[in-house]
Image: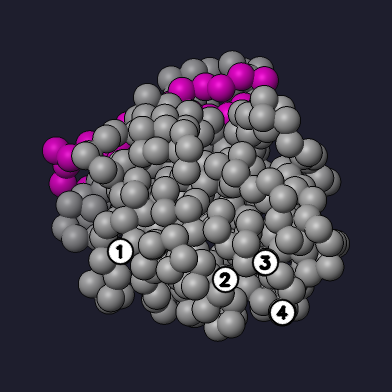
């Protein structure tokens, strides 16, 4: 894999995680990705849906294949501003306030980023206070949480804080932590997959067919970017890079073995394409796991459901605490790169 060892993956993922990119406000991570691609000299552009698209020409344009990794992250939206600088917020994507806990968040205003404190209320209270219910087994919800800024409304307005402003976890809370061969961090979904995509941009040189590597936009709110791209670009296959939730209900082991999905909430993945990817893994000595998951969708399964691509697959790495403070084995992330490098360089002939 050349320079893409575990240390390099950790450093790259850390840099990506620290680029805020809530769905629809992805400029910060866009700049990072574009600078990276400029430095390695590959053909890339930003389309009208805010996708960053890399094209690696093949021997033929027939049977073109796309690999996507979404660059957006979940968070919250400002819903209302109260007179004392308190902000009401609602969910953006599959986020839950109890996952973040009380602490510093960043509010991405139109003109300035403002810090705030995600708050649930004091504990030393009786049933006269609504947050008492949160101490008795009921999880805190966005409706009962808020953000304290301690700023005047005029100051917030001047910074461009308004209904629709994105809220994300503060950067100093997002910095990844190393646990041996594992990385722990918010937004590994899907910054770790973007790191794999950047690795592919370096390592795919002369594929049999045209390859499009797509850092897709607004996946967490309906795979908007991937649907836009796959509607306009004729593809024979689309492979999504993703996380795989580790849970007792799924027979998936933590560790360096990536996971192929057979089915998720949007439908079946293509069995023939899965077999091709399994063969590519075998060729490079990587044994893949397979899973059927629920409450999950990817760029590939959603694009298949809407008839944009005939064949789709989702290659993922096992992850604990998905949509929270996630933990994943760097070896599994690196092996996703290894398998797809083999597949795209040697196994993409149209069948």
Q: Residues within 10 Å of mark 2 (few under 14, many from 20)?
A: many
Q: Mark 3 or 2, which is nearer the eye?
A: 3
Q: Find numbered disc 3 in the image and state the secondary structure of the residue it sits on.
A: loop
Residue highlighted by disc 2:
313
Quarter the C terminus occupies = bottom right
Residue highlighted by disc 1:
246
Reply yes or no: does residue 331 show up in magenta.
Answer: no
Q: Mark 2 or 1, which is nearer the eye?
A: 2
Q: Mark 3 or 1, which is nearer the eye?
A: 3
Query: Which numbered dot is residue 348?
Result: 3
Q: Find numbered disc 1 in the image and state the secondary structure of the residue it sits on.
A: loop
Q: Quadrant of residue 179?
A: top left
As drawn, is 177 to the left or to the right of 209?
Answer: left
Query: Which numbered dot is residue 351?
Result: 4
Reply yes or no: does residue 108 show up in magenta.
Answer: yes
The residue located at (16%, 46%) in the rendering is: 126
Q: Give the range drawn in magenta.
A: 101-128
Q: Is residue 49 visible?
A: no
Q: Residues within 10 Å of mark 1 (few under 14, many from 20)?
A: some
């Amino acid at each position: 894999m050349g320079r893409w060892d575990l240390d390099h993956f950790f450093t790259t993922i850390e840099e990506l995680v620290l680029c805020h990119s809530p769905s629809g406000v992805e400029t910060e991570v866009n700049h990072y990705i574009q600078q990276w691609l400029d430095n390695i000299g590959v053909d890339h552009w930003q389309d009208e849906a805010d996708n960053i698209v890399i094209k690696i020409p093949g021997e033929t344009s027939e049977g073109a294949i796309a690999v996507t990794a979404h660059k957006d992250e979940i968070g919250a939206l400002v819903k209302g501003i109260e007179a004392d600088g308190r902000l009401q917020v609602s969910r953006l994507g599959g986020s839950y306030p109890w996952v973040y806990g009380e602490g510093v968040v960043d509010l991405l205003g139109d003109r300035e980023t403002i810090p705030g404190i995600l708050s649930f209320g004091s504990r030393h209270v009786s049933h006269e206070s609504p947050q008492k219910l949160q101490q008795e087994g009921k999880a805190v919800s966005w409706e009962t949480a808020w953000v304290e800024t301690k700023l005047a409304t005029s100051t917030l307005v001047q910074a461009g804080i308004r209904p629709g402003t994105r809220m994300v976890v503060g950067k100093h809370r997002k910095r990844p932590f190393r646990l041996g061969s594992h990385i722990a961090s918010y937004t590994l979904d899907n910054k770790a997959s973007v790191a794999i995509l950047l690795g592919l941009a370096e390592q795919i040189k002369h594929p049999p067919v045209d390859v499009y590597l797509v850092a897709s936009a607004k996946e967490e709110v309906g795979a908007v970017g991937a649907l836009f791209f796959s509607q306009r670009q004729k593809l024979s296959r689309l492979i999504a890079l993703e996380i795989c939730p580790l849970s007792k209900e799924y027979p998936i082991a933590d560790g360096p073995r990536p996971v192929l999905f057979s089915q998720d909430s949007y439908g079946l993945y293509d069995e023939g394409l899965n077999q091709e990817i399994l063969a590519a893994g075998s060729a490079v000595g990587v044994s893949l796991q397979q899973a059927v998951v629920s409450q999950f969708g990817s760029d590939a399964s959603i694009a298949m459901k809407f008839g944009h691509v005939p064949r789709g697959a989702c290659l993922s790495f096992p992850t604990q605490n998905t949509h929270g403070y996630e933990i994943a084995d760097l070896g599994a992330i690196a092996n996703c790169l290894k398998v797809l490098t083999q597949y795209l360089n040697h196994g993409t002939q149209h069948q």
